[in-house]
Image: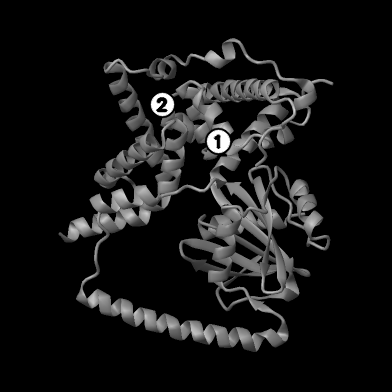
Amino acid sequence: MEVMAAEQDRFYALIWPLADVVLRTARVLCARASDAEDLAQETLMKAFRALDQFHPGTDARAWLLTILRRSHIDRLRQQKSRGQTSSLEAMELDVAAPEACPEPLDPAAWHDPAAMLARFGDEQIISAMRQLPESMAWSLLLVDVEELELTDAAELMEVPVGTVKSRLHRARAALRAILEHERKKAEHHEPSKSHHSR
Amino acid sequence: MSLPNRTTLDDATATRLRWLRTQPVDLTNLKASIEQQIPRSRPGFIQRHLLLVRAMAASVVLGVVVVLLVLSLGSNEVLASPALLAQLHRETVFMPAHGQLVKSIPDAQSALTRDWPAAPDLPSTTPDQKVVSCCIHMIGAHRIASVRLKVDGQDVSVSVTDADNFRLPEGQTVHIAGNAFTVQSHDGLNMLMGRQGDRFLCVISTLPVERLERVTADLMSP
């Protein structure tokens, strides 16, 4: 009983403070909020059951994100076996669909890329990330959003550092292409309105 | 008009993505379902009484702190208490809404100067200290400028203000580049604070104190 209580205390001291990282990442991976919460819950429960495998002093965030990634892969495999739409193949084969026919950036609009990107709201950025192949989305999530070191991201994704770097470059370009496509589409539909501001 | 080069585009994209971390996350449902499956351990009889004693002691300490603060108002100085600076560090790392993402100390200095023309000079960084963001805090009537760095993958906050604004707490002292720094620890954070000329400088991180001393020495090198 005391052992159980100690494990619970350990969970709430070490793991629960990172619940926002888990849920935020799951929100990018899952379009539906309820799916994201299910995935986050599954990740935290697995972390609780595997607490004895966590080494104090190591990066709890990277450990949790590893569990999250594996849980997400398992879910995609289950969806695939049930014949549901799955991006598992895209993840494993590293298919770069958005890059196959990238939307060329308008130099006049993108001459100040920081200002241009600030015009897109968080939900628009997240929606664009969801359109990327899984491997690209994970590269952006780990390195750009969570600011993990390249070596940690590579270990987490079980690929060499060079692969993470190349995925990152392609993912950022693909993300801009998607956003540019959305911008042009919005301008086409509503020529008098500008984009949402942050 | 031509497009900026790929590096500029990539840097802007990475910076924009970093902002997603500041998006609030509603944990209400997740918290409820997790607490249902992993109940928080309830303190036993003795622990409950210990908690009560601790709460009473904390109230007394808080009262004393308030009295000391009121007494110290005459000197217009604020005691740089570890709890206060730990809070400052957390706010710097989790970047307040008015914070700004920056890539270098000159960028941070110019961003801070826009809101605080008399902002003290920020220390210069070394290549292994990645500059992430900056912001200005208000503590009492005093402003303090903070910069978030990444060193060895860990967050480090560097805060500066006029030396007259803060009074250093008692504690172990180390000498770095000829200046005395007080070493403090609070809530898992290590902190070094001291004066360099007319500038108060505080460096805080979860990094070990020895590593923090080397970081501070690098920051103070010309």
**Label 1 is found on which chain of the structure?**
A
Find disc 1 in the rendering and name its residue.
A123
> In screen coordinates, is B144 left or right of B46?
right
Residue A135 at x, y percent in the picture: 47, 23
Mark 2 to mark 1: distance in Å? Answer: 29 Å
In the drawing, what numbered circle is on residue A5?
none
Q: Secondary structure at mark 1?
A: helix
- Figure check: B135 above or below B66: above
Residue A44 at x, y percent in the picture: 32, 44
- Figure check: B37 above or below A110: below
Q: Quadrant of the C terminus of chain B?
A: bottom right
Residue, x 71% and y 58% (percent of image)? B220
Check if mark 2 and mark 1 are on a common chain: yes
Amino acid on which disc 1 is placed:
Glu
Residue, x 42% and y 31% (percent of image)? A30
Front-lying residue, A192 or B161: A192
Q: Does residue A124 appear anywhere in the picture?
A: yes
**Label 2 is found on which chain of the structure?**
A
Find disc 2 in the rendering and name its residue.
A158
- Figure check: B132 above or below B184: above
- Figure check: B155 above or below A156: below
Q: Does residue B152 appear anywhere in the picture?
A: no
Residue A84 at x, y percent in the picture: 33, 18
Front-lying residue, B209 or A1: A1
